[in-house]
Image (tube, rainbow, N blue to C red):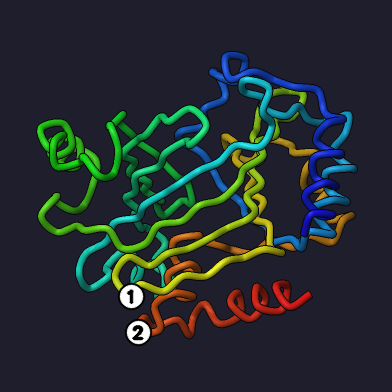
Amino acid sequence: MQTHHKGIEERIGLLPPISLEEMSGIKLMNRTDTKFVATFGQLLDFLSAVKGEYYIQEINGKRIARYHTTYFDTDDYQMYRMHHCGRITREKIRVRTYLDSDNTFFEIKNKNNHGRTKKKRISVSGVGTLHEEYNEIIPFLGKHAWYSIDELSPAIENWFNRITLVNSKKTERLTIDFNLEFHHLRSGLRDKLKQTAIIELKRDGNVPSPALGILWKTRIKRSGFSKYCIGSALTNKDLKSNNFKERLTMVKKIEQQ
């Protein structure tokens, strides 16, 4: 494991940096997302191959960011079940903290029937103090979400590390998530993915992407992967997960390497 992480640091150290301010025009709040699942070995090959094509986001000298996310759902897991049954239009509601800066946002992600993801968010103090900010959250939910505050409660939390890349033309972002850890807040179960990396290509429509060719050359395959749904399936055995069986099998195989 240490060898893997050392290899990541060595490879991202060769990429030119881009600051958060320089990335301000690449928010892509209305975008298309394409996800890929990689082993750590494939990730190292990919990071070597993107040199010359991508910048890496650097904040206060750090190139690997730490995240903590809490996902909300109804008591009967409507959001999970919509994703599981393959519904194209769906929603996720979460609180995300950027641990290095301690910035926290209450976020609503909606995917429409054209495959585009729209994200809305407001700044909050933290997941533990949301009840003190209901005056801001209630109208925010009313405007952008399908659910009211009374229908929602925390379901699962996760932690992960993220690398963010930006192509040289600044038309897309690539996020690479690894060291994923899940804690289901209702079942109490935990799980970790130590060998699996999730690469997500985020762009405004189908603009040309150098990453697609690099992903193909490094044999990293496209695969839908919801951290909320896969994490929930791994940590709550009462949830129906047969439609995620292929992805769960793939992740378990990677983790056994």
Report, in whole angstroms, how far the alpha carbon at label 1 lies from the one at label 2.
9 Å
Q: Residue 83 at x, y = what percent?
A: 40, 67
Q: Earlier in the sequence, mark 1 or mark 2?
A: 1
Q: Amino acid at mark 1?
A: Ser
Q: Eyeballing the image, is 139 above or below 43? A: above
Image-quadrant location for residue 17: top right
How packed mark 2 is, by other alpha carbons closer than 10 Å (few <14, some 14-19, many 20 or more), is few
Asked if the residue under mark 2 is in contact with the one under mark 1, i.e. CB atoms within 8 Å, the reply is yes
User: Which label number is shown at residue 187?
Assistant: 1
Q: Amino acid at mark 2?
A: Asp
Residue at 45% x, 67% y: name it: 229
Quick check: 145 left or right of 176?
Answer: left
Callout in the foreground (1, 2): 1
Image-quadrant location for residue 187: bottom left
Q: Element type at marker 2?
A: loop
In the image, farthest residue toward the top: 21
The front one of 51 and 11 is 11
Mark 2 lies on residue: 238
